[in-house]
Image (cartoon, rainbow, N blue to C red):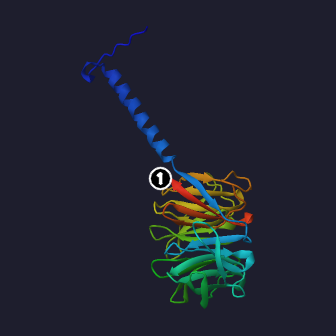
Amino acid sequence: MIKLQYTQFTVGKWPDWIVKSMRFIYSIFVLWLISHSVSAYELVYVAGSEQIFKQPHDIVLSRDRRYLYIADNNNDRIAVLDPDSLTLIGTFGEGQVREPHDVVFQSADTLLVADTGNNRIAIFNVQGANAELVGELRGTIRRPEGVAVHSNGRIYATGAVSGNIEAFENGESIAVAEGLSAPHDISIAPDGSLWIADAGNDRLVNMNQALRVIRSLKGPPYQFSGPRYLDFDQAGRLYVADKYNHQIKVLASDHAVLFTLGSGRSGIGRNVFDRPEGITIQGQDIWFSDTYNDRIVRYQIVNQTR
């Protein structure tokens, strides 16, 4: 039998070099804990819809969380789902929209649609799965594929063919920024600035409200390939549908790559995608459009540490 004897030491009796060594080891241990707590973030698969869409693009949740609206691109319609079961409740827009790409709420009952094939932003009054076309916005944008509503009241829209982003106020165009390539989504950051998926340039562009460039994210470590739609969660993390990488990338508030969901190859099942495009987030719940698998998938955020 081996006997272990515990001996108590006091710091004052230890040599100075041992104390310094212990403090160094402790600092390394703290850094290790911090790095591992950052990487504890995770997305967990919850459910997937049936494959009843034709290349669904961006998605948005109603403010009362009762309905999930899908830009059902190749069906030329807006599909309405139950956000929990992902079952189809109804559709609207048939004969009114062509190749819709984006959907966003301006108010609780006003839905803006990037009506790509009609070169406009269509405005619908919605009540659940019922909707009435009540207006439109037109400007310099051609084949609009992204639209966003800012807290300042402005509406921003991108033109994929015209390569620009345009700002509207009270129904009138007030500013245009050029120099983009096939821009898609616009997402409003917590600080009020805009993030644009500049898909043709494989980058994200950050602009202020006056459409002046602040910064861009491109190349390593992001390696975007045709980024499409974006959204922020309540912690300020930015989610990117990285289409041709078949991935969802999550950026921390300091723009570091925090998490990547997807194998990098097309597929269908849990945690794999085929050219995903749309994203919407509320609280811990996230919905993605797995575009070329013609389905919507739901995930949840767990282990939030950054």
Q: Nearer the viewer, residue 144 or 48?
A: 48
Q: In which quarter of the image is residue 114?
A: bottom right
Q: Please name the residue that numbered disc 1 is placed on.
A: 304
Please determine whether, in this image, residue 259 is positioned above or below residue 292.
Answer: above
Please determine whether, in this image, residue 43 is positioned above or below residue 173.
Answer: above
Specify whether 122 is left or right of 268.
left
Residue 181: percent from left, percent from top? 68, 71
* Residue drawn at point x = 60 percent, y = 81 percent: 129
Residue 297: percent from left, percent from top? 64, 62
Q: Which residue in the rendered view is the most extreme toward the left?
A: 12
* Residue drawn at point x = 55 percent, y = 89 percent: 172
Q: Three-letter amino acid code at disc 1?
A: Gln
* Residue drawn at point x = 56 percent, y = 62 percent: 286
* Residue drawn at point x = 67 percent, y = 65 percent: 49
Residue 109: percent from left, percent from top? 52, 83
Specify whether 137 is left or right of 162.
left
Q: Which of 97 and 30 is in front in this view?
A: 97
Specify whether 40 is left or right of 203.
left
Q: In which quarter of the image is the N terminus?
A: top left
